Amino acid sequence: MAEVTLDELVKEFEDVVAVDHVSLDIPDESFTVLVGPSGCGKTTTLRLVAGLERATDGTISIGDEIVNDRRAYERNIAMVFQNYALYPHKSVEENMRFGLEQQGTDDDVIEERVADAAELLQIEELLDRRPSELSGGQQQRVALGRAIVRDPDVFLMDEPLSNLDAKLRVQMRAELNKLHEELDTTTVYVTHDQIEAMTLADQIAVMDAGEIQQVGEPTFVYANPRNMFVADFLGSPSMNFLEGTLRQREGGLVVDYGGFEHEVPEAHRSNVERRIGERVALGVRPENVSVAQRGYPATVEVVEPQGEKTVLELTVGDGRSLNASVEPDEVVTVGEEIRIEFDRSKLHYFDPETGESLT
Ligand code: ATP
C-alpha cells in the first residue's frame, strides 16, 4: 500500500512560507497532480515528499509510516525531473541499472527489470546509446525507465514534460497515461500547465501562495471551482468575471452592471439572495458565451481563429471585456455589433471581496 498523506505540512525558508499548512490525501494508485502558478509551493511540496527538504512542521506519511525522519533513499520513491538528470557518460542501459546496482540488487533481477522497462517504454534499440545521442523525448523515456526499474511505492514527477516541444508533450502525456494504467503506481506530478493537469490527473490539487485551494477530480473542480482563483486558473481562455450589484426586480433578481442587467437563474437565487444590494461577480466561461439572435449587445474587438475554436474578445455594457470561445464556422468581423447570450446552466457567482464561490 502506498498512499501518501500530508498533514498540516509547513516549509519555511528564512522569510518565505513556501508550503503553508498543506493537508492532502494522495490515494494508493492515484495520479495526483499539484498545479498552480510559479512560486505557489508545488515543487517544494514534492521535494518534501521525496525527502530532499526537511519539513518545518507537519507530517508526511507513505503507507502507514510517518517518513519525516527518513532519508530520501529510505523512502522507496523514484523521482523524475524536468532536466532528466541522466548520467552523460553512461549508456542508457547503465543509466537504468545504476540505482539498482547501488542498492545491491541481484544482477539477474536487474537484467529482467531493465529489459521489462525498456520494452514497456519502447527504448530497447537505444540501450547502448549515450544520452547525448538521444532526442529529448527519448531522454525523457530513459528517465522514466530509470524510475520504473526501481519498482518504487511512489513516482514523484516535477514538470517532466516541460523541456519537450508542444507536439511531443501531447504524445508523452498520452504515454504517461498509458503507463499509469499499466503500472498503477501512486504518482504525484507537479506542473504549472493546467491542460497537462486536467488531462493526466485523476485527482488535481490547485495551489496558490503555499496553500491548497481545492482538491478533486479535474472535471468536478473545473465545473465547481470553490473560489475565483481556481475558476480563473483552470481553463483557457480563462473564466470571465463581471462584477455588478445584486438587485431585486419584479419577479426575480438581477446583477446590475450599470447599462445592462443579467437575470439570476432560478437555480442560483437562494444562493445569492442574501447579498441583495451588495457587489457580486458573475463568472462565465468563454465556451458558455455564444453569438445569438437576441441577448446582450456586444462589440467584436478581436477575432482569433485557433483551429478547433475561435476566440472572440468582446466589449459589453460600459466597456467591459469578455471572451467568447465559439465554433470556427461562426463568421464575425472586428468592429461588428453582435448579440451574445450565456449558457444559464453554467453560471457561477462569487463574492468579489473574498473570491469565495456563493454557489
Ligand atoms: P515553479 O513552478 O516556479 O517551480 P513552485 O510552485 O514549484 O514554482 P516552489 O519552487 O515550491 O514553487 O517555491 C515556493 C516558494 O519558496 C517561492 O517563493 C520560492 O522562491 C521559495 N523557495 C523555494 N526554494 C527555496 C530555497 N531553497 N530557499 C529559499 N526560498 C525558496
Image (cartoon, rainbow, N blue to C red):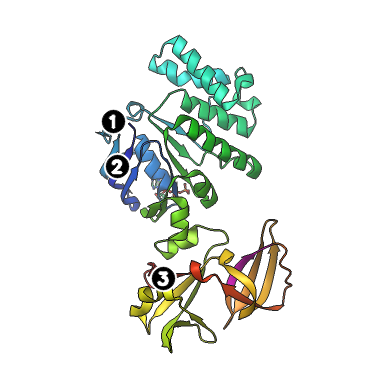
Q: Residue at x 60, y 20 (%)?
A: 124
**Mark 3 vs 2, N-terminal side:** 2
Residue at 47%, 53% in the rendered image: 219
Q: CA distance from mark 1 to mark 3?
A: 43 Å
Marks 3 and 2, how far apart at CA: 35 Å
Tell me the CA gap for discs 1 and 2.
Answer: 12 Å
Residue neighbourhood size for the residue with mark 1, other residues' Cα within 10 Å, grouped as few (<14), some (14–19), many (≥20):
few
Is 301 in the magenta? no
Is residue 349 depicted above or below 310 in this figure?
A: below
Residue identified by numbered label 3: 350
Q: Residues within 10 Å of mark 3 (few under 14, many from 20)?
A: many
Say which amino acid is labelled 1: Arg
The C terminus, quarter of image: bottom left
Range of residues picked out in magenta: 322-327
Q: At label 2, which amino acid type do we have?
A: Ala
* Res 70 label: 1
Q: Main secondary structure of the magenta part?
A: strand
Residue 316 location, x and y as percent?
A: 59, 79
Q: Is residue 297 visible?
A: no
